[in-house]
Image: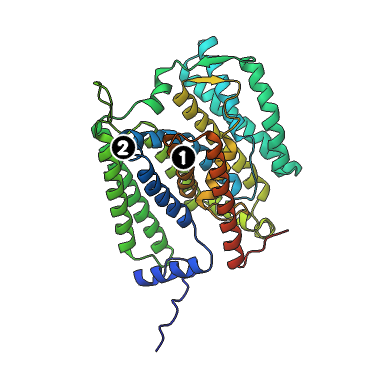
Amino acid sequence: MTTPEPTFIGTGHEGSIRDQVGSYIQRLRQGDMGALPAIGGLIVLAVLFSFLSPYFLTRLNFANLFTQAATLVMLAMALVFVILLGEIDLSAGVTSGVSMAIFVILVNVMQVNWILAILASLLTGIVIGTFIGFFVAKVGIPSFVVTLGLFLGFQGLQLLIIGTGGLYRVETPEVIAIMNDNLPTWGGWVMLAVAVAVSLGTGLWDRSRRARAGVANRPIGLLWARLAAIAVLGGIVVTVLNDNRSLSVKPIQGVPIVIPIALAVLWIGTFVLDRTRYGRYLYAVGGSAEAARRAGIKVAMVRWVAFIICSTLAVVSGIFDASRIGAVDASSGRAIVLSGVAAAVVGGVSLFGGRGRLIHAAIGAFVIAIIGNGLGLLGLPSGVNFLVTGAVLILAASVDAVSRKRAGGAILR
């Protein structure tokens, strides 16, 4: 007697834990793999580089990975909002560069308070996103054309703001500390406790909302399992980062300050996508803009807001980059945008729109960061890094296309 195939769970909430597992396996068979390939790649790369380099699994390099990946993680999360619509923003990197050029000029030349300068930079991102969104959503120009034009034009704007060959050091201690300083050892445990508490509160709130609406909930055991995973994995990370990783007399220990900032942005962005009307509309428009329009969704406004969010988060990515390097020049942000797109796609965000999550982009960014970090430790030239990253991107895009075919999605040719 053969065992029947598990019944597909329509909303993802009905059934027991066994039903949930069976439904997940069935979704994998149908091509909905999510971030699973990226997680597998992350594990394979970590194991590979740990054998190839004795320095890869050291405490110092473990902390460096987080700071090296932070800029790309933030930019990849920014791009998710437009990629979910099947759009692209090639100007996100130079948007961050222009915004940080304005920041250093305000602080270093005009002696403006650094907080006001940061706000001015974020406002610049909002204005740029509004500009892009208008031409894409209202005028109807393809996002590739609009953002490619800004990618080229903003390079000239950076030259005008900073000057040819110019460079300004970032001398604001609070900004430098983002990527170069650490929380006290107790601060890491507080961060972990807050993360677990927020996850618990969010999970219980979701369950109460569904219960009030008379909709089925997932088994409560899944919530406890998720909290346990966060506590265990987070505890391992905090423990390692709290160990002294200094190679000199002065101790270096604690969770880098950038980590709680990135986690806060990740949680807020995920909340917007998963638990707000705008997030539901964004996925609906990305899945089928015409169907969303017929359902009464203001498609143009959804697109417009997505570009504003993308450009604003790109500025945050620029702040991280300026903090890590300690300087802003006329070329800041030019090279990173394609890596941001690659990170999102490698993580499982579909270039065809309608599928993906912020955490997927963050995982993809860590995959690309590990490639760069590992190859750097092996002393290989940067050309090899580009070749490997390009190959990984093509592989990820192929997996996305094949999975959509298996799921019955139409791919226009």
Residue 287 visible, this angle: yes
Residue occupying the point 34% across, 46% down: 198
Query: Compared to 364, does 55 lie above or below?
Result: above
Q: What is the C-alpha distance between the residues marked 2 and 1?
A: 16 Å
Quadrant in the rendering for residue 163: top right
Residue occupying the point 64% across, 42% down: 304
- Viewer-side label of 2, 1: 2
Rate crowding at label 2 as few (under 14), some (14 to 19) or many (20 or more) other CA atoms within 10 Å. Answer: some
User: Mark 1 is on which residue type?
Assistant: Ala
Q: Position of residue 48 (x, y in %)?
A: 40, 48
Q: Position of residue 18 (x, y in %)?
A: 35, 71
Quickly name the residue at label 1: 369
Q: Quadrant of the C terminus?
A: bottom right
User: Mark 2 is on which residue type?
Assistant: Thr
Q: How is the image coloured?
A: rainbow
Number of marks? 2
Q: Position of residue 212 (x, y in %)?
A: 40, 62
Query: Compared to 49, does 411 lie above or below?
Result: below
Mark number displayed over residue 58: 2
Mark 2: secondary structure = loop
Residue occupying the point 65% across, 60% down: 295
Residue 79 visible, this angle: no
279 sits left or right of 43 in the view: right
Quadrant in the rendering for residue 354: bottom right
